[in-house]
């Protein structure tokens, strides 16, 4: 036997094999090639789209929150109010709604209920946030809140992008497997009678 043609030698390839690509595989189906290229495409989409989606969504949420924070800071301010009654002591709540009174910038005396610690005595000064109409409200959104919103929304966008890419890949893989199974059944229907005939001889 010619040692050059033996598959166990490491000599140069024969001229007959030089035209065969190294990546050629007679068992590789067209669907396998498509699946490989589609997987590469999805990886590129994931590598490029995930950071873009996270950054874009996060920055949009941050800028929106900062705009709301600036608007709220311009429309809200703190006032000093005093309790008009003792806060209830015997309660299971961490904060107890109690009536307070303050005088607004327009000279109008206003009263409302705010949450204070149980047992706070009458006349205690508390700081409350009010809007331009004198209605008690919450403090304006802070820079930290805006940053947190941006990070959360950016992370959610990144997770959604990754989940979407995975869903596309999983769905495509299932469809390709079903197609391969149908092809296998069709080929077996043609090959099975030939194999059965050999055993009946």
Image (cartoon, rainbow, N blue to C red):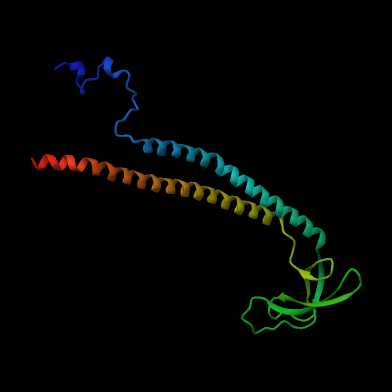
Count of numbered marks: 0
Farthest residue to the right: give it.
Answer: 107
Give the image location of residue 44, x and y in percent: 51, 37
- Which image quadrant for residue 1? top left
Residue in the image at 28% along x and 43% along y: 186
Residue 72 image-quadrant placement: bottom right
- Residue 133, position as x, y percentages in the image: 84, 69
Which of 32/22 is in front? Answer: 32
Work out whether residue 12 can be spotted.
no
Above or below residue 147? Residue 133 is below
Q: Nearer the viewer, residue 54 or 193?
A: 193
Residue under the point 24% across and 41% down: 190
Percent coordinates x, y for residue 21 in the rendering: 34, 23
- Residue at 54%, 51% (x, y): give it: 160
Quadrant of image for the C terminus: top left
The residue depicted at 48 percent of the width and 37 percent of the height is 41
Q: Is residue 43 above or below residue 163?
A: above
Answer left or right for 29 relative to 158.
Answer: left
Q: Position of residue 147 (x, y in %)?
A: 66, 52
* Residue sitting at the far left: 201
- 88 or 22: nearer the eye? 22
């Amino acid at each position: 036997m010619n040692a050059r043609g033996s598959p166990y030698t490491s000599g140069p390839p024969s001229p007959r094999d030089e035209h065969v690509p190294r990546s050629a595989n007679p068992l590789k189906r067209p669907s396998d090639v498509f699946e490989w290229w589609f997987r590469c495409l999805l990886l590129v989409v994931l590598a490029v789209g995930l950071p873009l989606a996270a950054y874009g969504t996060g920055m949009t949420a941050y800028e929106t929150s900062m705009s709301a924070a600036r608007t709220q800071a311009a429309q809200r301010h703190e006032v000093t109010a005093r309790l008009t009654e003792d806060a209830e002591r015997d309660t299971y709540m961490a904060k107890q709604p109690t009536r307070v009174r303050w005088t607004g910038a327009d000279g109008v005396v206003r009263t409302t209920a705010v949450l204070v610690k149980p047992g706070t005595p009458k006349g205690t000064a508390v700081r409350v946030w009010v809007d331009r109409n004198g209605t008690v409200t919450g403090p304006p959104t802070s820079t930290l809140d805006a940053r947190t919103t941006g990070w959360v929304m950016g992370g959610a966008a990144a997770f959604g992008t990754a989940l979407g890419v995975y869903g596309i890949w999983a769905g495509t893989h299932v469809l390709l497997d079903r197609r391969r199974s149908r092809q296998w059944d069709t080929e077996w229907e043609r090959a099975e009678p030939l194999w059965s005939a050999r055993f009946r001889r």
